[in-house]
Image (cartoon, grey):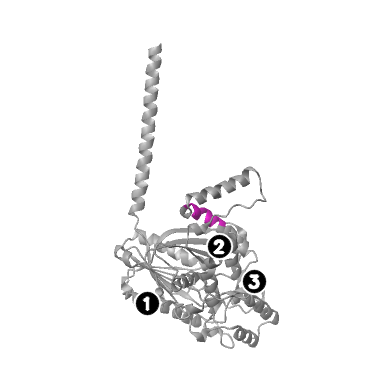
Amino acid sequence: MARIQEYILFYAELIISTAICSTMAATIAVLILMYLIHKRKPKVYLLDFSCYRPPNSCRLPMSMFLENVLLDGTDPDSIAFQVKILEKSGFSEETCIPPSLTCLPIRKSLSFALEEVTTVMFSAVSDLFEKHNINPRAVDVLISNSSLFCPTPSLSTLIINKFRMRSNIKNFNLSGMGCSAGLIAVSLAKDLLRVHSNSLALIVSTEALVLNWYKGKVPSMLLTNCLFRMGGAAVLMSSRKQDKGRAKYELQHLVRTNKAQDDQSHACVFQDMDPENKQGISISKDILHVAGDALKANIGALGPMVLPISEQIRYGISILIRKIWSQRRRKTRIPNFKKAFEHFCIHAGGRAVIQGIERNLELRKEDVEASKMTLYRFGNTSSSSLWYELSYIEAKGKMKKGDRVWQIAFGSGFKCNSAVWKCVANVGAEKENVWRDIIHSYPVEIPN
């Protein structure tokens, strides 16, 4: 009987050992496979970018704004509301709008809208190509984005025609994606560059103001007149091995969050008709709350990818303490993202947006300097604002090799997108930088 028990124990141990070894072997095999798959993915680089700088003739100082809306027959209550918003906007007297909007009466037409977007796009792309001596026919992927202006033929087709690009170029045009469309374009470019390795991608981001200038009386729709200004950017990305040595940045992570399943989030930025049948973009009072919820979800996905383990443990412990002891009033510890990033580019959507993120993430004044100065000098240029901010950091000489940058964008829907870049070159101030001859004047103190 004892002998039988010994045999049973022996075979049981043998079976368990075999199972453990098999499990370990399978785990190791999976890890090796994941490593090889990750290693085989081509790295995606940001070679360079160029931002459009409107001429001084397009400036919209407060005095001109007041004169124009008054002489254009705008309702007095609407004028008073817009002046109140502009006084708190954090804008300088240097922000710009298209020339047709400074005319009396204000001119809104398809031809003026096309003139606006082609001026911005073609200038930014030309500057980028000339700077790096790039043949337009070398571009394999082209992505354009403008949320509210979607003509036929598309904006990407206009660029192909202007620069005589190849007939087999993979071109895409994104519309209706809001101010976060720039990073959505980066996400699409990343996927395409990894599928079609050894390729070059051009992204062109802008927004058309001409057809979307609101002349009605609804306050939530008048906000767009006060917030959005003229601008655009061209971005060159690559998965070509030969571009590693001349790239500025390498894309580390890209996280997209979409809260459109929630009715409040879906409706907080909405294109609609007012009671007088005038078209406009309505911005809800709930937008800061909605943006905060979207940012929390986005950070929840991004945090484990970028935060040091020690910071993740501290954050996890603070959540457990709050749940176990039901200390609902106790504030959850905010992860220290300054340990993960050296630079922050927060979408210049408005003064309240930047201040809200600064407060909630416990950032320093210098961490949001680029965002505040971009809003002050250029206004909200929609999806291109992040590139004006990155230009500011470069112009200040703050970008060093090895530094990590966190770009945060918000858009209608409601969306919050994050991109993380690592600087792979010694980036200095360049004469082609959009801030080139004015950077010495910044930062400035912005009155409340």
Disc nearest the viewer among 3 and 2: 2
Residue 223, image x, y percentages: 62, 74
Quarter holding residue 163:
bottom left
Residue 292, image x, y percentages: 59, 60
> Which quarter of the figure is the C terminus placed in?
bottom right
Whether residue 232 is in magenta: the answer is: no
Quick check: can you spot residue 365? Answer: yes
Q: Tag 2's secondary structure?
A: loop
Q: Amino acid under label 3?
A: Ser
Label 3 to label 2: alpha-carbon separation: 30 Å
Disc nearest the viewer among 3 and 1: 3
Residue at numbered disc 3: 220
Whether residue 299 is in magenta: the answer is: yes
The residue lying toward the viewer, choosing from 30 and 361, is: 361
Q: Amino acid under label 2?
A: Leu
Magenta-colored span? 296-304
Residue at figure coordinates x 57%, y 67% from the top left: 354
Q: Name the magenta segment's main secondary structure.
A: helix
> Which quarter of the figure is the N terminus placed in?
top left
Residue at numbered disc 2: 363
Q: Which mark is residue 161?
A: 1
User: Which residue extends farthest left?
Assistant: 242
Quarter holding residue 430:
bottom left
